[in-house]
Amino acid sequence: MKNIVCFGANSDIGKALLKILAEFEASNFFLLSREITQLNSLASELKLIGAKNVEVYEFDALKTDEALKNLGKIDRVDYLLICHGYLPKYKFFSEEELELVFRINCLSVIKIIEYFIPIFKNQKGGKIVVITSVAGDRGRKKLGYYSAAKAGVDAYLSALRQEMSDYRELQILTVKPGFVKTKMTEGLNGPFPASPEDVAEDILKAMIKNKNILYTPWFWRFIMAFIKIIPESVFKRLNF
Ligand SMILES: NC(=O)c1ccc[n+]([C@@H]2O[C@H](COP(=O)([O-])OP(=O)(O)OC[C@H]3O[C@@H](n4cnc5c(N)ncnc54)[C@H](OP(=O)(O)O)[C@@H]3O)[C@@H](O)[C@H]2O)c1
């Protein structure tokens, strides 16, 4: 039976992923979020779908150390899923926003991973799944802090894969969604909107195939490949 730990379990993408994992195999779930009431109702849903046991814990990414301490000792972690994130309203040149975006989207993610690394080393394998974003592939105006924080995690995960390359049974999956219709994007009109369920299915497939990087939906790999090759002298004049 798998032990699945999910930070940001109340995120729309996280919830969709947890539901298909619960359907896929009977597992023990450790769910973390700031919203305990909502986590409790998710826990009941997961049990109905097939989860063996579900525990819920409070997690504020601005107090990650506290959350990790309260989580207590988990001896084995098969899947570590990191799904929380914060997309700021458009603000640039704001120290307060800069701190929030980096602490939630980048620092907490790295802290969580490093907390669990000894466990993964000890068990010589497992799966670490982190949701970053296509926004990390190239910084765009209005998304500067968010893009930079997500790019920071992408670079960290790439380094971690090399650091941990001796552990052949350890998968480190970077998930880069395009525009997904969730609480985070409510009221926004993004291109090619996907549903959290579509993204969750892609993630499960990528977990099964032991992939390193997943663009979801798949066509974002090509969109971003094109966006990345636009010369900076042209890109800086584009208005998107
Ligand atoms: N939607 C998109 O278009 C899109 C595209 C690319 C990447 N992503 C990424 O996908 C992931 C999931 O987001 P989503 O789209 O499913 O949006 P969502 O439903 O709004 O989920 C985001 C979650 O982040 C959590 N969060 C925010 N601030 C937090 C904090 N200080 N401490 C702990 N948790 C915090 C919230 O959890 P609680 O309020 O429950 O604590 C919220 O449920 C995020 O990493 C996001 O950046 C989304």
Image: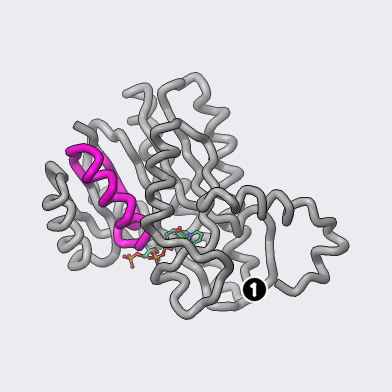
| Left or right of residue 133, residue 104 in this image | left
Q: Residue at x 28, y 48 (%)?
A: 20
- Report the front residue among 98 and 20: 20
Q: Quadrant of ligand 1?
A: bottom left
Q: How many marks?
A: 1
**Residue marked by disc 1:** 142
- Report the front residue among 130 and 223: 223
Picture layout, residue 138 above or below residue 110 = below
Q: Position of residue 208 (x, y in %)?
A: 39, 33
Picture layout, residue 82 above or below residue 88 = above
Residue 15, quarter of picture: bottom left
Q: Any atom of ligand 1 within 8 Å of the CB at mark 1?
A: no
Secondary element at image label 1: loop
Question: Which three-letter amino acid code belongs to the residue tagged 1?
Answer: Lys
Q: Position of residue 149 (x, y in %)?
A: 57, 57
In the rendered image, which quarter contains the C terminus?
bottom right
| Stretch of the chain drawn in magenta | 4-29
Q: Residue at x 54, y 28 (%)?
A: 163
